[in-house]
Image: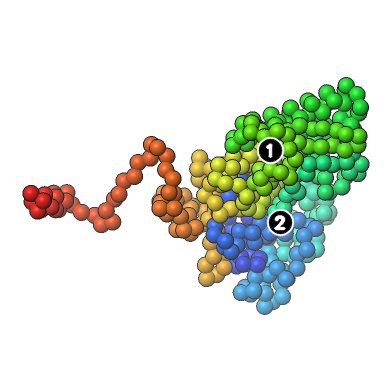
Amino acid sequence: MLITRAHLKAFRSVFEFGFPIDPKITVMIGANESGKTNILRGLESFRPDFPFTNSLTCQYSDYYYQGRCPEVTLEFSHLSRENRRNLIPFSEIFKDVEKFSVIKNGPDLTNYHVFVKDEELSISNIKRFLEFLPKILYFDNISLIKSRVELDTLLNGDVTSRTERNLLKIGGLQNNFEIIFEDSTRGRRASEEAGKLITQQIRRVWSQEPTIEIKLNVNGKVLYIDISDGTTVYDTAESRSLGFRWYLSFYINFIAQTFEAKANEYFFLIDEPGIHLHPAGQKDLTKVMEDLAIKNQLIYTTHSPFMINREFPQRVRLVYKGREGTKIDNCAYRDNWKPLRRSIGLVLGDLFFFNDSSFILEVPSKKTSIRKKLQLFKSHSGKNA
């Protein structure tokens, strides 16, 4: 099941608009304070556990003066056989329906309304119904990886060690953390193999340093996570740059999240990923996004043009703020990305480093006939004779 369209009404800086959602990745790009985060929060507010009150209502909408909550609508389509099997007990209409919409306009479960075309369905157990829809997860803060973690902390599920647990998951230890703490050949071999597997995963998505290596060392009941590259010996995670540490932590958490997930089980909302990365790192990050989108839809916000995969211009949504609040342009790529360039203030002069094979052509701002150009050329040549 995919979320194919969203419609927000009277949510914070959003007066009202709807926009299509890409089957894989949707990029929300725009200047600071344009309302990108409000769009993500609006989508997140669809969750039943979100504190959905009239404090979120747009202050220049009629809903605000009426004391009403905002309104969030999501359209769902591409139902699989399993999706239909789960939804048919709620209504026989899901045997053949191609798409349906769910509207949320208040804080309670009774404020969810399911529609097929213009007909509202009567759903007896809306809480159970919502459990079969993609789970919306919002990320704006990634727990940065630490250089040491204790076994007890790993086992008790402490949220402060989530990134370290996920690191071990992508190292093949998702069901047996204890094995690497064994003082035995088996324990040491498991630790080495996990480190190699993690290193392979990281090298695949981090092109800036192809010699990067992750090593797991155990001393008693404490796991030490060391990192090295071609220019340094093994060192702590905290000694690495903030950009790399964030990137590593981001990759670990999201890849581990999708390892055991079913296709399209999650719908990720990611606010300003890669803000600590330089352009090459941001380009690498877009590759990670492609990996995540193999199994789950995601939306991320950015104000960096380096976070756009130009092979898929249709994914980009330009966010800007007009007189009626936050707006979206779904065709920011038209006229050679002119709307986007104008919105974020990007001009050719900002790109002061060029590729060796670059070609720059100056075009006159006014159209001039060939005859006029020849006359000007002859006149100029005569003066220089």
Tell me if I can see residue 20 in this picture: no
Indicate the quadrant where residue 150 lies.
top right
Vertically, is 356 above or below 105?
above
Mark 1: which secondary structure?
loop
- Viewer-proximal residue among 110 and 370: 370
* Image position of 140 (left or right of 18): right
Q: Position of residue 174 (x, y in %)?
A: 83, 34
Q: Which amino acid does the dot numbered 2 rest on?
A: Glu
Q: Position of residue 140 (x, y in %)?
A: 70, 54
Tell me if I can see residue 343 in this picture: yes
Q: CA distance from mark 2 to mark 1?
A: 19 Å
Residue at 58% from the left image edge and 64% from the top image edge: 33
- Viewer-proximal residue among 89 and 101: 101
- Closer to the chain start, of discs 2 and 1, is 2
Indicate the quadrant where residue 161 lies.
top right
Q: Which amino acid does the dot numbered 1 rest on?
A: Lys
Quadrant (top left, top right, bottom left, bottom right) of the N terminus: top right
Q: Position of residue 46 (x, y in %)?
A: 72, 57
Vertically, is 125 above or below 86?
below
Residue at 38% from the left image edge and 40% from the top image edge: 358
* Image position of 6 (left or right of 365): right
Mark 2: which secondary structure?
helix
Q: Position of residue 333 (x, y in %)?
A: 46, 50
Crowd rating for badge 1 (residues with CA inside 10 Å; few <14, some 14–19, many 20+)? some
| Count of numbered marks | 2
Residue at 62% from the left image edge and 67% from the top image edge: 13
Q: Which residue position holds label 2?
A: 44
Residue at 88% from the left image edge and 34% from the top image edge: 219
Q: Which residue position holds label 1?
A: 295
